[in-house]
Image (cartoon, rainbow, N blue to C red):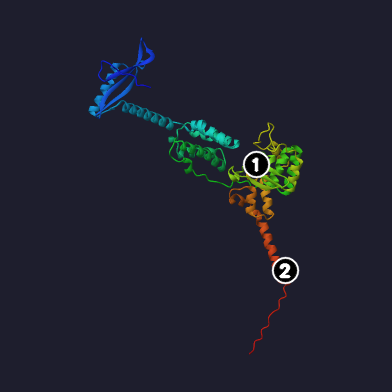
Amino acid sequence: MAKQKRMKTIYPGVRFREHSGRKHGVNFDRYFFIRYTIDGKEREEGLGWASEGWTAEKASIQRAELKKSQKTGEGARTLKEKRDRAEKKRNDQKRVADQEAAENTSFGDFFQDTYWPVASTSKKAGSYKKEMQHFRLWIRPVVGALPFRKINQIQVEKIKRNMQRANRAPRSIEYVLATFRQVWNLAKGTGLTMVDSPSKMVKIHMTDNERQRYLTDDEAESLLSELKSRSEQVYQMALVSLDSGARFSEIARLKKSHLDIDGGVITYADTKMAGGTKNRVVPMTSRLKDLFKSMPLGAKFKLIFQGKDGRVLHEVSNTFRTSVKALELNGGVIDHRMKVVFHTLRHTYASRLVQAGVDLYVVQRLLGHSVSKMTERYSHLSNDTLAAAVRRMEHATKTISEDSNVIPLETNVKN
């Protein structure tokens, strides 16, 4: 496009060009330019349209300001420089405003607006729902309204103290502070805070909170029988746990595609052992094979044990607790670690393996424990097995000794 002709005005160094068709009032719209010399070179810069408020007089004033800046060395010497400075000022003001907004963002607002949407799309339903419960019951009452810069170890200690006063177990406190820490770390990753989570400085005195109860053979069979009389599905799920050591959540996600009945193995997908990235393969017992053969398993990728709505079950049926109560398996038991719950079936599976002399490393693999320490709680059950092994060794040594034809040596000493 050819450069349009500039027309002079009564003001020195101020020119304009007319729009080819657009009018402003009765005249064609005009675009104003200023021309001046800087560093020995002629320079022309555009200002704007008359329809935007520019006039030849305003253009002249603008030119005069720039020439003054060139002489004094103060302020912008060109329109571009002036615009760049204005843009920088706007960016600086926006950065300060954003920083102030970030510094004033409360823990509660960040959880609701940022952390929760991320957690609800990247974590299992049970996990992010628990985190919301942690936030709603324990975290929000203490730090929900506070910006991150005002949260320190004192507030986190208060969360811990509130839970202790409510007789919450150390493990529960640990879980709540873990939720706090995950929210804080995401905030740090997004620039809301530059410091580490103050929860790292809060100490929790951990007690042995691990479940210790396991069922005898008679108790296990009685429980299975009771469950079967009340609910076929709960009975089947209990049998799967008892004979494969599966967690309830693993059984609830079990599909036909996870079963190799002919090969006699179950594949538990996305287990805790693997952090949700690997599978665990467990051999079937004979009665598990018989169970799955007798069941109408349906489509390959359909859940074997599903809720009424066809979705994944998220909690153990009341039928289990009712059956345990009917058998009085928890009668007089005060220590929660000794109470029979669904997870007791998994402990019973592990206990049977250890008592049968199975190596703890193998038990660890079958249970899907990520570290051996989790499996070592069963080590005391192997004492009888070890003692029996020593007795067998002792008996074998004694037998060899008795059966040996030992000929004593006679030493003739000559005087």
The N terminus, quarter of image: top left
Residue occupied by mark 2: 399
In the displayed orientation, state which residue is furthest to the bottom: 415
Sequence order check: which comes first, mark 1 or mark 2? 1
Classify 18 as above or below 217: above
Q: Position of residue 148 (x, y in %)?
A: 45, 35
Q: Quadrant of residue 246?
A: top right
Query: Percent x, y for residue 236?
Result: 72, 41
Query: What x and y, as percent, mark residue 193?
Result: 44, 37
Q: Amino acid at mark 1?
A: Glu
Residue closest to the eye, 60 or 404: 60
Front residue of 23/281: it is 23
Q: In the image, is residue 57 above or below residue 188?
A: above
Give 149 or 298, whichever is nearer the viewer. Answer: 298
Q: Secondary structure at mark 2?
A: helix
Q: Which class describes the residues within 10 Å of circle 2: few (<14), some (14-19), or many (20+)?
A: few
Q: What is the number of callouts on the image? A: 2
Please state if 324 lies on the left or on the right of 47 as rendered: right
Q: Quadrant of residue 27?
A: top left
In the rendering, at what x and y percent does residue 39 appear?
25, 30
Quarter of the image where one finds residue 257: top right
Q: Amino acid at mark 2?
A: Thr
Q: Which residue has dot 1 on it?
A: 250
Quadrant that contains the C terminus:
bottom right
